[in-house]
Amino acid sequence: MIGYPNKKKSIAKVNNYANLGMTLESDIVETNAYYLKHNLAVIHKKPTPIQVVNVSYPARNKAKITEAYYRTPSTTDFNGLYKGKYIDFDAKETTSKTSFPLANVHEHQILHLTDVDNHGGIAFLIVGWKAYNEYYYLPFKSLLAIWDKSKTDGRKSIPYSYFKETCHQIPFSYQPRLNYLKIVDLFI
Amino acid sequence: MIGYPNKKKSIAKVNNYANLGMTLESDIVETNAYYLKHNLAVIHKKPTPIQVVNVSYPARNKAKITEAYYRTPSTTDFNGLYKGKYIDFDAKETTSKTSFPLANVHEHQILHLTDVDNHGGIAFLIVGWKAYNEYYYLPFKSLLAIWDKSKTDGRKSIPYSYFKETCHQIPFSYQPRLNYLKIVDLFI
């Protein structure tokens, strides 16, 4: 996966693991630590996939990677176990006030979540609206319906009103930060 | 789906840069690809965790990591979903002919697999004996009993005879390479 041919993709790629989405990601990581500590669930963030090209050994015990590149993840960022169920999701954040761009979701994530859904796992997205400090639970089945429809109707985003009207909002608090399992409970 | 690596490609890439236990690991990665392709299970290897220290931007669209270090994984290498069940395991390989050193298993892996086991997931190790080309399924509960006992009896390894006599051997073949789900089936 070396070299990204078009501009659009590099932008999407940067969104994955850099600045944007970092707050949401760390809030979820903290939430997961809370869940683990309180013996509620075992959910972890997967490491960011990195393609290592060169490694040097300046010190005896420590390999130093001197050339490496970010790779596009082939799955989602988070998975784990809750009440005996397999959980799998990704977190997306938008700065838009009106719509969530479907370009934030990658085809391979749709494919992966389809697999998860077909095999009886619980698949969803957590979508954060920075402008409102609001977080929504988007069930994968709803996302897939919109995604499939977008192939024919050409729609490139999901309006904020859709989240407001049809999705469960995830409560934000001090501890746990984003209690998304409260919403998962409604689906199991 | 422009330019995204297909699963087979990512597998090839994984093969490129890891070292110890690589054969067993790549056999499992190939097995997982087979499971996914035949719609049997959704099990992936987690990326190797890497701590990025410095990134440069020599080209407009491509972040180049110029300093990074391998981190100790906080969980196991493999997890996923099979028949609606959460599966979590690590693969270990030994060159010994007589015993599997417990030092191959890290304390944090024991803790993680304990969490998985407590929450109703299926936890185990795949232990490969290079000298015999044999692979065994070691249920986590068996490992934990030995691990706990080792704290008092000081035993530092599990004898080969233990695997031979009490563990299920994982069939090795062309496709799938290591059909470990055949053994998982006995435990669910």
Image: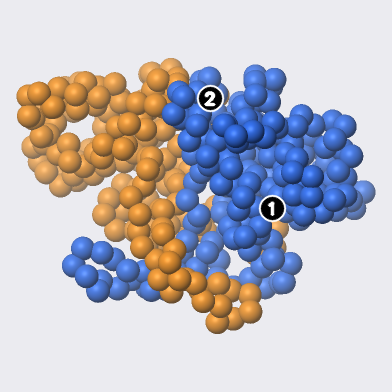
Chain colours: A blue, B orange
Q: Nearer the viewer, residue A153 or B27?
A: A153
Q: Could you tell me which residue is drawn at 8 percent across and 37 percent down?
A: B98
Q: Could you tell me which residue is drawn at 87 percent across and 32 percent down?
A: A165
B134 versus B85 height, above or below: below
Q: Which quarter of the picture shows residue A132? A: top right
* Classed neighbour count for the residue bearing mark 1: other residues with Cα under 10 Å, few (<14), some (14–19), many (≥20): many
Q: Which residue is mark 1?
A: A106
Taking the image as shown, residue B137 lies to the left or right of residue A162, namely left
- The x, y position of residue A114, in whole percent, is 67, 38
Q: Is residue B55 visible?
A: yes
A172 versus B53 height, above or below: above
The C terminus of chain B: image quadrant: top left
Distance, label 1 to label 2, CA atoms, is 25 Å
Tell me, yes or no, whether the two marked residues, 1 and 2, touch with CB atoms within 8 Å.
Answer: no
Q: Is residue B37 visible?
A: no
- The x, y position of residue A183, in whole percent, is 68, 26
- The x, y position of residue B154, in whole percent, is 7, 29
Please tell me the numbered disc located at residue A82. Answer: 2
Q: Which quarter of the picture shows residue A112? A: top right
